[in-house]
Image (cartoon, rainbow, N blue to C red):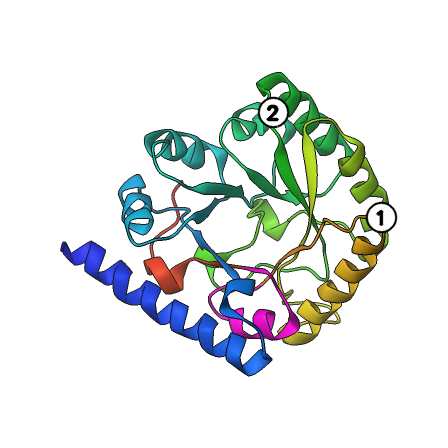
């Protein structure tokens, strides 16, 4: 076993223990929570190690990094999630490899995703990204979707979910899977991750009244996955706790 594989295996086991313990504390079954490993800034070799260790869901937030990495790992049984702020000129490329886009935040993006999914003959899962606050996360490797200059990031306010969800549900080539958020560092929910995630769960309940199959709730990262599991998240996105700290690319 290489040093890097051993390092990742140890970290992955620790994260699995944390998720399992959080599930026990919340009275949930471990299989109710899916781990997505955020592989941005890490090489394709790490993705291959993760796959060997049983990871099935990986996430990326920059197409220029993700596209070649996904191509290099196309033989692996992975589900690729795109979690970054997505510009429409990158949609064709992203649709080529992403199984799920977690950062759907505007109608123009829905239109572009639908057009390219139909062109590619694919069905792409979509999560509506909900903005519960603002500011950059403290942990760049777990940073949320976005990473735009000046701390800008996408996301719709809670009041915009219904309209955007209906657009996704009606768009050819797209599948409405649920909601995603990141615990904000400013605003009403600053420092209150559990409350932010519970708010997302309430919004998910409302969404599922109109779209019962849209039951995915993506929340929680390395620092706050326990709070997300406690609130009811179905998916947690973990980067540095599994892969360590690595400088940003670019």
Give the residues drawn in magenta, as a range. Answer: 220-235
* Depth check, front residue: 212 or 87: 212
Q: Where is 99 relative to 37, above or below? A: above
Residue at 33% from the left image edge and 31% from the top image edge? 72
Residue 128 is situated, as x and y percent measured from the top left of the image, at 71, 47
Q: Are marks 1 and 2 in contact (CB under 8 Å)?
A: no
Q: Say whether residue 226 is left or right of residue 166.
A: left
Residue 111 - label: none
Q: Say whether residue 248 is left or right of residue 194.
A: left
Quadrant location of the N terminus? Answer: bottom left
Residue at which label 1 appears: 162
Tag 1: Cα neighbours inside 10 Å, few (<14), some, or many (≥20)? some
Instruction: Check if residue 229 falls in the magenta segment.
Output: yes
Q: Say whether residue 156 is left or right of residue 229.
A: right
Residue at which label 2 appears: 89
Secondary structure beneath dot 2 equals helix
Quadrant location of the C terminus? Answer: top left
Query: In the current view of this chain or complex, which residue is farthest to the bottom?
Result: 25
Secondary structure beneath dot 1 equals helix
Residue at 83% from the left image edge and 59% from the top image edge? 206
Residue at 46% from the left image edge and 66% from the top image edge? 222
Tell me, yes or no, if residue 224 can be seen here: no
Residue at 63% from the left image edge and 67% from the top image edge? 185
Query: In the current view of this chain or complex, which residue is farthest to the top?
Result: 119
Tell me, yes or no, if residue 149 can be seen here: yes
Residue 166 is situated, as x and y percent measured from the top left of the image, at 83, 40
Query: What distance separates the C-alpha of mark 1 from that of mark 2?
Result: 25 Å
Residue 163 is situated, as x and y percent measured from the top left of the image, at 86, 43
Callout count = 2
């Amino acid at each position: 076993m290489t040093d890097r594989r051993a390092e990742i295996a140890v970290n992955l086991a620790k994260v699995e223990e944390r998720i399992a313990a959080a599930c026990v504390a919340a009275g949930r079954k471990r299989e109710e929570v899916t781990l997505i490993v955020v592989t941005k800034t890490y090489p394709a070799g790490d993705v291959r190690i993760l796959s060997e260790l049983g990871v099935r869901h990986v996430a990326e937030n920059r197409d220029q990094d993700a596209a070649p990495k996904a191509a290099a790992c196309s033989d692996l049984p992975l589900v690729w999630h795109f979690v970054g702020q997505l510009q429409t000129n990158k949609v064709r490329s992203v649709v080529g490899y992403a199984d799920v886009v977690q950062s759907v935040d505007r109608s123009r993006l829905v239109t572009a995703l639908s057009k390219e999914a139909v062109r590619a003959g694919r069905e792409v899962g979509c999560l509506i990204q909900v903005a519960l606050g603002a500011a950059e996360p403290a942990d760049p490797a777990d940073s949320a979707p976005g990473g735009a200059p000046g701390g800008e990031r996408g996301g719709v306010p809670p009041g915009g979910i219904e309209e955007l969800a209906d657009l996704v549900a009606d768009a050819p080539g797209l599948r409405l899977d649920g909601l995603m958020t990141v615990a904000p560092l400013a605003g009403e929910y600053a420092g209150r991750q559990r409350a932010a995630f519970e708010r997302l769960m309430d919004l998910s309940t409302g969404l599922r009244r109109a779209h019962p199959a849209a039951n995915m709730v993506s929340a929680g990262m390395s620092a706050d996955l326990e709070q997300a599991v406690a609130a009811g998240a179905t998916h947690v996105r973990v980067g540095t706790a599994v892969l360590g700290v690595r400088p940003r690319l670019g």
